[in-house]
């Protein structure tokens, strides 16, 4: 499952679905604490017209890996307060 996020979404808001973030100007919440690249898809605003094509390139295997990474990030964090930093 994918969730379209115009702004950097909270982990809880997208729990269970991979966020697709379309916003060039903000960093996701908890940036530097959780590794958003492991469980989100960022699409530059200038490429928004390519969104269907970009999303079609995400394989089922990659989507599953991203959902698993999202679940791991979620279990490390309590909404509003992070419990552990992401490993380097």
Image: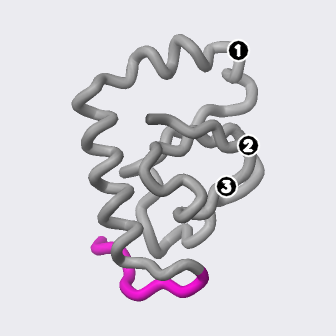
What residue sits right under mark 3 in the picture? 8
Q: CA distance from mark 2 to mark 1?
A: 14 Å
Q: What kind of element bears circle 2?
A: loop
Q: Based on the picture, tell me whether residue 36 belongs to the magenta stretch.
A: no
Tell me the residue that label 2 is attached to: 6
What SS does tag 3 mark? Answer: loop
Which region is colored magenta? Answer: 80-88
Using a 10 Å C-alpha cutoff, classify the residue at mark 1 as few (fewer than 14 neighbours), some (14 to 19) or many (20 or more).
Answer: few
Residue pointed to by mark 1: 49
Q: Earlier in the sequence, mark 3 or mark 1?
A: 3
User: Mark 2 Cα within 10 Å, few/some/many (few <14, many 20+)?
Assistant: few
Q: Quadrant of the C terminus?
A: bottom left
Placement of 76 over or under 8, stated as above or below: below
Q: Residue at x 36, y 77 (%)?
A: 76
* In the image: residue 20, left or right of residue 37: right
Choose top left, top right, bottom left or bottom right for residue 69.
Answer: bottom left
Q: Is residue 87 magenta?
A: yes
> How many neighbours does mark 3 have within 10 angstroms: few (below 14), some (14-19), or many (20 or more)?
some
């Amino acid at each position: 499952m994918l969730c379209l996020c115009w702004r950097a979404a909270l982990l809880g808001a997208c729990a269970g679905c991979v966020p697709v973030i379309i916003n060039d100007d903000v960093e996701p919440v908890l940036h530097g604490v959780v590794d958003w690249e492991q469980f989100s898809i960022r699409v530059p605003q200038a490429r928004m017209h390519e969104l269907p094509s970009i999303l079609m390139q995400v394989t089922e295997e990659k989507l599953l890996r991203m959902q698993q990474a999202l679940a791991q990030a979620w279990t490390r964090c309590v909404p509003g307060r992070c419990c552990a930093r992401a490993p380097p």
